[in-house]
Image (cartoon, grey):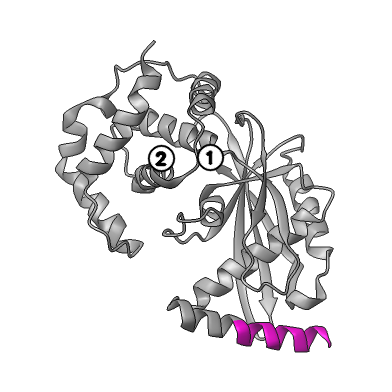
């Protein structure tokens, strides 16, 4: 079968999946393109240089699929953050072929730019055009630097949409580190915090994720130290007024509507659970 025929066959299968799951076809296509980029990473010499984090990581964990994601987030390790180097790395990834997935990554379309991921330093955003038969999209990847993973990157088998394709085995953040980073962000940006997804994600991970509490404590301690945030309970996040703030509750309800989350879940309930579970790690 030629690449063109594979692409047509795959596209038809993805259309069927979108109907079966009652999910927009473009969303399925985005998930597929992200998955196939991660496959190329998994069989490349760069596998240990890019550690998966963010929404794509949470999608990979069972029961954590509620929020769609448009970007793939990585932590770059032992790799130069120079734009030309990052661009060349992704060009090399695009050169890796997988005939049976039907996907073509257009390496000449790659663009890179510096972005501000944190106040301390910049990251790099990569854009690349991807095609499948007559369908195409531009997907984005954000690469951050400088954070630490506790205890270490973990092996992750990323879910594939079509079980006839090769497995995608990559390195990823531990869930304990995901919680630690989001927890630190909640505290660091408490007064202007509009990132409702952080609260949603931490709540879901603590509820259904397989978390080791000792590792979580180590991750919180290491992350806060690395980011220069003091271990203390003297933060506005822990005040009752944080949960009852009208603007914050409106943002929460808007977020649940955006991600089409149907279960009744108030911000007060989420805040109470998170602070009950995590405040103990801030007590010296």
Q: Position of residue 214 (x, y in %)?
A: 51, 24
Residue in view at x 23 percent, y 42 percent: 269
Task: Give the camera-side residue of 70 and 160.
Answer: 160
61 is higher (above) or lower (below) than 245: below
Residue tagged 2: 206
Which region of the structure is painted magenta? 1-13
Q: Is residue 265 left or right of residue 32?
A: left
Decide: few, some or many residues near mark 1? Use Cα within 10 Å; few <14, some 14-19, many ≥20. many
269 is higher (above) or lower (below) than 60: above
Q: Position of residue 228 (x, y in %)?
A: 49, 19
Residue in view at x 80 percent, y 47 percent: 46
Q: On the rendered image, what quadrant is the N terminus found in?
A: bottom right
Q: Is residue 230 left or right of residue 55?
A: left
Residue 159's label in the rendered image is: none
Q: Earlier in the sequence, mark 2 or mark 1?
A: 1
- The answer to whether residue 24 is visible is no
- The answer to whether residue 281 is visible is yes
Q: How many marks?
A: 2
Task: Give the camera-side residue of 19 and 235.
Answer: 19
Residue tagged 1: 175
| 12 magenta-colored | yes
Decide: few, some or many residues near mark 2? Use Cα within 10 Å; few <14, some 14-19, many ≥20. some
Q: Position of residue 229 (x, y in %)?
A: 45, 20
Residue in view at x 40 percent, y 41 percent: 202
SS at mark 1 in the image: helix
SS at mark 2 in the image: helix
Q: On the rendered image, what quadrant is the C terminus found in?
A: top left
Residue in view at x 49 percent, y 33 percent: 181
Q: CA distance from mark 2 to mark 1?
A: 9 Å
Rendered image quadrant of residue 28 = bottom right
Q: Is residue 203 left or right of residue 111?
A: left
| 96 magenta-colored | no
């Amino acid at each position: 079968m030629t690449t063109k025929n594979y692409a047509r066959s795959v596209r038809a299968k993805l259309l069927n999946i979108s109907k079966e799951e009652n999910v927009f076809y473009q969303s399925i296509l985005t998930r597929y393109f992200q998955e196939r980029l991660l496959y190329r990473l998994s069989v490349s010499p760069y596998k240990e240089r890019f550690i998966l984090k963010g929404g794509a990581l949470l999608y990979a964990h069972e029961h954590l699929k509620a929020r769609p994601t448009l970007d793939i987030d990585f932590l770059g390790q032992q790799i130069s953050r120079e734009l030309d180097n990052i661009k060349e790395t992704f060009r090399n990834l695009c050169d890796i072929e997988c005939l049976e997935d039907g996907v073509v990554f257009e390496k000449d379309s790659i663009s890179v730019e510096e972005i501000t991921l944190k106040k301390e330093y910049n990251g790099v955003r990569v854009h690349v055009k991807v095609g499948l038969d007559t369908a195409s999209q531009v997907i984005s990847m954000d690469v951050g630097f400088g954070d630490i993973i506790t205890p270490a990157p973990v092996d992750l088998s990323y879910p594939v949409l079509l079980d006839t394709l090769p497995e995608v085995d990559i390195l990823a953040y531990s869930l304990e580190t995901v919680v630690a980073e989001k927890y630190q962000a909640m505290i660091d940006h408490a007064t202007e915090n509009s990132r409702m997804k952080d609260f949603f994600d931490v709540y879901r991970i603590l509820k259904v994720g397989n978390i080791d509490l000792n590792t979580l404590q180590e991750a919180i301690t290491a992350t806060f130290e690395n980011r220069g945030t003091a271990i203390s309970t003297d933060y506005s996040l822990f005040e009752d007024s944080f949960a009852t703030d009208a603007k914050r509750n409106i943002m929460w309800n808007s977020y649940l509507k955006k991600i089409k989350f149907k279960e009744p879940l108030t911000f007060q309930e989420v805040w109470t659970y998170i602070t009950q579970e995590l405040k103990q790690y801030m007590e010296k």
